[in-house]
């Protein structure tokens, strides 16, 4: 089932938690709501579920207006960070609960419930644990039971609020793989909240980046990482270097590094954003006369297994920034702390105020002046 959020604004007294949010989630997609704490992710999820009401806007399921329907009518499956299983019921009863409390008319028979619960246990790979109590399961197992319980009532879609938040890294990774697989098998629309960018990138077909009650960007993991719409998205998705400079005479000057802009971008202060893995480090000045290389001092070297991170300080602007490279490249280079290197800046995105990114088309090549 598709979900459409149309122009939703939600305020608590005089605090605006969501502002003019619009979002379309096509049927069958696995979508992440990603953003820092307080950005409005849970509020949006609760509004879609029908647990909250907004002051403005509509919520449509498959094009049908559900704004005024209550939570039970919406037939949504939920899973929260803290598994919230019934502690006094065994796993079988936890899974059967949603079906046994249905009105007599729509309640399945005992045999049907038994079959359903066992097929769900098979689906979440917990067969044989039906008679255990929640306290006798690991955190990851409990969370899989919570998912199975949400699926038991055959929801139109699943809403997951930081479903793996309380689990340790290794279990989280396993559950991510498992959820991806489950989604592939069921083809259900799933919307999940996370503040972990790696989780969003690894799991989701599409990521909705939120900040201060607004949607900053919606795109595939590839798009939001490689084509961030604005400085917030750039900075939120991974490490980033900032270089301060100016646009003048159609050229973008970041200290001694200069780039040409494809079209007229005005004049004034500008900030260059760049990922550490796009910084090319060399011990020698580049052969080309392009003015994108600057000198820097190596302040610190951090070995991170297969990756090596250098903390560098530009000699021209004194800005401190990071470069990342493979261990192999690091060993070939022979960089030392305190030494001087040449860095070439690739893939810089220039942002002026909050306008869309300017991608420099090429490095500025100074003209030879003949005397
Ligand atoms: N019932 C409430 N009354 C007042 N303010 C609220 C209420 N619920 C949420 N808020 C505020 O709305 C904002 C958005 O909260 P929300 O829980 O949606 O954020 P979030 O992105 O899910 O954050 P987190 O990752 O920390 O869970 C926060 O500033 C929060 O303090």
Image (spheres, rainbow, N blue to C red):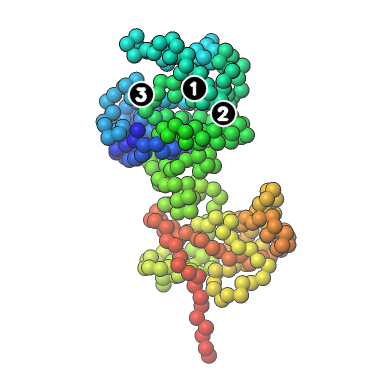
Looking at the image, residue 285 sits to the left or right of residue 109; the answer is right
Q: Which residue is mark 2?
A: 166
Q: Which residue is mark 1?
A: 120
Looking at the image, residue 368 sits to the left or right of residue 351; the answer is right
CA gap between label 3 and label 1 equals: 18 Å
CA gap between label 1 and label 2 equals: 23 Å
Secondary structure found at label 1: helix
Q: Which residue is mark 3?
A: 75
Q: Return the disc, 2 or 3, that comes first in the chain's sequence.
A: 3
- Percent across and percent down for residue 208 are 42, 42
Q: Is residue 61 above or below residue 89?
A: below
Which numbered disc, 2 or 3, marks the residue closer to the eye?
Answer: 3
Secondary structure found at label 3: loop
- Percent across and percent down for residue 266 are 37, 66
CB-based contact (under 8 Å), mark 3 and mark 1? no
- Of residues 40 and 13, the one nearer the viewer is 40
- Does the residue tagged 2 have its C-beta within 8 Å of any atom of ligand 1? no
The local crowd at label 2, few if under 14, some if 14 to 19, many if 20 or more residues have their Cα within 10 Å, is: some
Q: Is residue 338 visible?
A: no
- Of residues 2 and 110, the one nearer the viewer is 110
Q: Which label is found at residue 199? A: none
At 53% from the left edge and 23% from the top edge, which residue is drawn?
A: 122
At 40% from the left edge and 11% from the top edge, which residue is drawn?
A: 109
């Amino acid at each position: 089932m598709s979900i459409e959020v149309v122009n939703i604004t939600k305020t608590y007294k005089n605090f605006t938690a969501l502002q003019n949010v619009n979002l379309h989630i096509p049927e069958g997609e696995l979508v992440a709501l990603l953003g820092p704490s307080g950005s409005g992710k849970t509020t949006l999820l609760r509004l879609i579920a029908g647990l909250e009401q907004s002051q403005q806007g509509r919520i449509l399921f498959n094009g049908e207006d559900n704004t005024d329907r209550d939570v039970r009518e919406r037939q949504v499956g939920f899973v929260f960070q803290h598994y919230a299983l019934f502690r006094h019921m065994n796993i079988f009863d936890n899974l059967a609960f949603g079906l046994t409390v249905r009105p007599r008319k729509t309640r399945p028979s005992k045999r049907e419930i038994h079959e359903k619960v066992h097929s769900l246990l098979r689906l979440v790979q917990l067969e044989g644990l039906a008679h255990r109590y929640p306290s006798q399961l690991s955190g990851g197992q409990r969370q899989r039971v919570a998912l199975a319980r949400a699926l038991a009532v055959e929801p139109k879609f699943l809403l997951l609020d930081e479903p793996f938040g309380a689990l340790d890294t290794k279990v989280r990774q396993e559950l991510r793989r498992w959820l991806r697989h489950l989604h592939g098998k069921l083809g259900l629309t799933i919307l999940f909240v996370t503040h972990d960018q790696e989780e969003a990138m690894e799991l989701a077909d599409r990521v909705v980046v939120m900040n201060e009650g607004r949607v900053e960007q919606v795109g595939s993991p590839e798009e939001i990482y490689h084509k961030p719409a604005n400085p917030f998205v750039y900075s939120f998705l991974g490490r980033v270097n900032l270089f301060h400079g100016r646009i003048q005479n159609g050229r973008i000057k970041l200290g001694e590094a200069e780039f040409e802009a494809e079209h007229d971008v005005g004049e004034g202060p500008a900030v260059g954003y760049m990922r550490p893995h796009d910084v090319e480090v060399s011990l020698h000045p580049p052969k080309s006369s392009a003015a994108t290389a600057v000198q820097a001092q190596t302040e610190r070297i951090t070995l991170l297994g297969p990756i090596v991170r250098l903390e560098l300080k530009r000699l021209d602007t004194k800005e401190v920034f990071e470069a990342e490279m493979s261990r192999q490249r690091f060993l070939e280079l022979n960089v030392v702390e305190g030494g001087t290197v040449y860095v070439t800046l690739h893939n810089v995105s220039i942002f002026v105020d909050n306008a869309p990114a300017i991608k420099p088309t090429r490095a500025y090549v100074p003209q030879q002046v003949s005397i």
